[in-house]
């Protein structure tokens, strides 16, 4: 039995979907505990490609209980569309549980997300415009509407009556369209009716699963550097994608977390604005972007690409207590002409090994690189560590040396089976 947390150790898009899908084969429960449909997990099953945004990746396995926990923000319309799309593709036998304490993304949250970005001008965050930040802001302001309200018409009406006058003032001030209680109620009461069968107290459900010694996989969304508290603020998301946030965001006690797997791309990417010391604005960056299909699942934006930055990975290790690493998209680096790993930064002539708090300082950080031997062999057929070229082993062992974390999984292709397992992180 174990309770395992999967966290992104960079700026998101590390390939968490593949790892959670892979580990999910041994899980009884898969939980998403933060974020919303700003996340995008791509999963390849056979020749079929599935892009998930709100729904946990355990949805494909009829034995798994999938939980959307209290720390999430849920767009009910988007969640229902996602479920209907899955059903249209034959995924009909699933178990889904949505926390009655999760917050609901309302249409005005999306309007405000777009407007704030516009008003920030050149300082815009580059959000996914899904209303994530404004929804979490309402939660903190105690004017949010929760799933428990959505599925109860009387509660929904009352919540809208309390919230809308305040939101309308804000919308009016920003020159945006205002809403009436009736128009939102007429649409959202139906989403509530459709989702009601999934909504429950998921904290209770998780405790029962813990008591029954179930294997529980907490599937992180986004990455540690996008953490509201520890990331490159303000160029972050509005939740905490760290292992530390899992207990509060899912209603379990911290002592129940056994193991944390950090998902780490073999290089680095980021979408949206903000500092990125190892960014490659050159031929090498383009090569990696094309080979890695580095375009946003949610927004389709080309991702910014750079060399692997171990200062970032070590920072994520400290914040989340990463016990093992899954190295993703390793095959993408095959054939790259010049390969480097960043092992420290230079700031004002001094060497540092952490992320400075201010954007000003972080923008001034210069990467300290070690140059790595390259390889040209196709590694997608490798299924054990020994069959990898010496240069690949060298790359992996360099990561282990500088992070002191074992690389337990190596992904050499998009398919489930294109994976090298060095240690089984899910004990059963
Ligand atoms: P928001 O989460 O839509 O508010 O966006 C805030 C920042 O987080 C932006 O830079 C987004 O591009 C980034 N972001 C949000 N979700 C993801 C994700 O799943 N992968 C990568 N970046 C993300």
Image (spheres, rainbow, N blue to C red):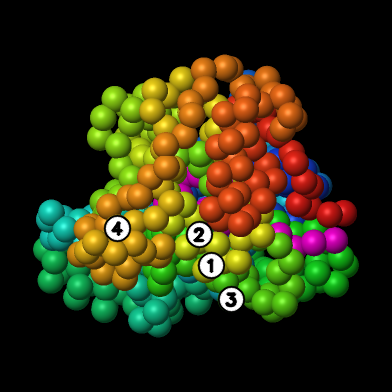
Where is mark 4, residue-wise? Answer: 346
Q: Nearer the viewer, residue 266 or 59?
A: 266
Q: Secondary structure at mark 2?
A: helix
Lateral position of residue 360 relative to residue 223, left or right: left
Location of the N terminus (image quadrant) = bottom right
Callout 4 environment at 10 Å: few (<14), some (14 to 19), or many (20+)? Answer: some
Disc 1 crowd, CA 10 A, few/some/many (<14, 14-19, 20+): few
Q: Does the Cβ of the disc 3 residue fall within 8 Å of ligand 1?
A: no
Residue 248 is labelled as 3
What secondary structure is found at the residue carrying circle 3? helix
| 45 drawn magenta | no
User: Image point 81% across, 69% down: which residue?
Assistant: 210
- Picture residue at 26% right of the left edge, 69% below the top: 358
Q: Which residues are magenta?
A: 1-17
Q: Is residue 196 left or right of residue 51?
A: right
Q: CA distance from mark 1 to mark 4?
A: 20 Å
Cβ of mark 4 under 8 Å from ligand 1: the answer is: no
Q: Is residue 158 above or below residue 199?
A: below
Q: Residues within 10 Å of mark 2 (few under 14, many from 20)?
A: many
Q: Do the CB atoms of the residues marked 1 and 2 lie less than 8 Å apart?
A: yes
Give how far across and how far down residue 23 sits, in percent: 72, 46
Question: Pointer 3: residues within 10 angstroms few (<14), some, or many (20+)?
Answer: some
Any mark on residue 154, and which?
none
Of badges 1 and 4, the one in the foreground is 4
Q: Nearer the viewer, residue 310 or 330?
A: 310
Residue under label 2, please give it. Answer: 314
Viewer-nearest of discs 1 and 3: 1
Whether the residue carrying mark 1 lies under 8 Å from ligand 1 is answered with: no
Residue 318 image label = 1
Residue 227 image-quadrant placement: bottom left
Query: Which comes sooner in the sequence, label 2 or label 4?
Result: 2
SS of the residue under disc 1: helix
């Amino acid at each position: 039995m174990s309770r395992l947390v999967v966290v992104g150790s960079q700026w998101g898009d590390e390939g968490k979907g593949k790892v959670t899908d892979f580990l999910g084969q041994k899980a009884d429960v898969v939980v998403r505990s933060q974020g919303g449909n700003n996340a995008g997990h791509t999963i390849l099953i056979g020749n079929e490609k599935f892009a998930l945004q709100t729904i946990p990746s355990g949805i494909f396995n009829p034995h798994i209980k999938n939980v959307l926990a209290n720390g999430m923000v849920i767009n009910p319309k988007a969640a229902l569309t996602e479920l209907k799309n899955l059903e249209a593709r034959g995924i009909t036998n699933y178990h889904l549980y949505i926390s009655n304490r999760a917050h609901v993304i309302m249409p005005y949250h999306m309007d405000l997300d777009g407007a704030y970005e516009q008003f920030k001008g050149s300082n815009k965050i580059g959000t996914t415009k899904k209303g994530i930040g404004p929804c979490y802001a309402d939660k903190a302001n105690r004017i949010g509407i929760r799933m428990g309200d959505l599925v109860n018409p009387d509660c929904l009406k009352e919540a809208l009556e309390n919230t809308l006058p305040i939101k309308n003032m804000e919308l009016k001030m920003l020159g945006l369209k205002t809403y009436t209680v009736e128009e939102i109620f007429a649409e959202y009461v139906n989403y509530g009716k459709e989702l009601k069968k999934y909504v429950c107290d998921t904290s209770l459900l998780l405790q029962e699963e813990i008591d029954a010694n179930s294997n529980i996989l907490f599937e992180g969304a986004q990455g540690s550097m996008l953490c509201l508290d520890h990331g490159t603020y303000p160029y972050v998301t509005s939740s905490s994608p760290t292992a530390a946030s899992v207990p509060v965001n899912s209603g379990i006690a911290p002592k129940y977390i056994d193991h944390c797997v950090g998902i780490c791309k073999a290089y680095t990417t980021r979408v949206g604005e903000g500092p990125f010391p190892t960014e490659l604005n050159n031929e090498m960056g383009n090569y990696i972007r094309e080979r890695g299909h580095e375009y946003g699942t949610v927004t389709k934006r080309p991702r910014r690409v750079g060399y692997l930055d171990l200062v970032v990975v070590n920072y994520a290790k400290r914040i989340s207590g990463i016990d093992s690493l899954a190295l993703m998209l390793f095959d993408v680096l095959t054939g790259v002409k010049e390969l480097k790993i960043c092992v420290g930064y230079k700031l004002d002539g001094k060497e540092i090994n952490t992320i400075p708090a201010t954007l000003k300082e972080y923008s001034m950080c210069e990467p300290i690189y070690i140059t790595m031997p390259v390889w040209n062999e196709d590694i997608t057929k490798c299924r054990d560590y020994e069959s990898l070229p010496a240069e690949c082993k060298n790359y992996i062992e360099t990561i282990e040396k500088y992070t002191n974390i074992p690389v337990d999984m190596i992904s050499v292709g998009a398919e489930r089976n294109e994976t090298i397992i060095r240690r089984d992180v899910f004990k059963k």
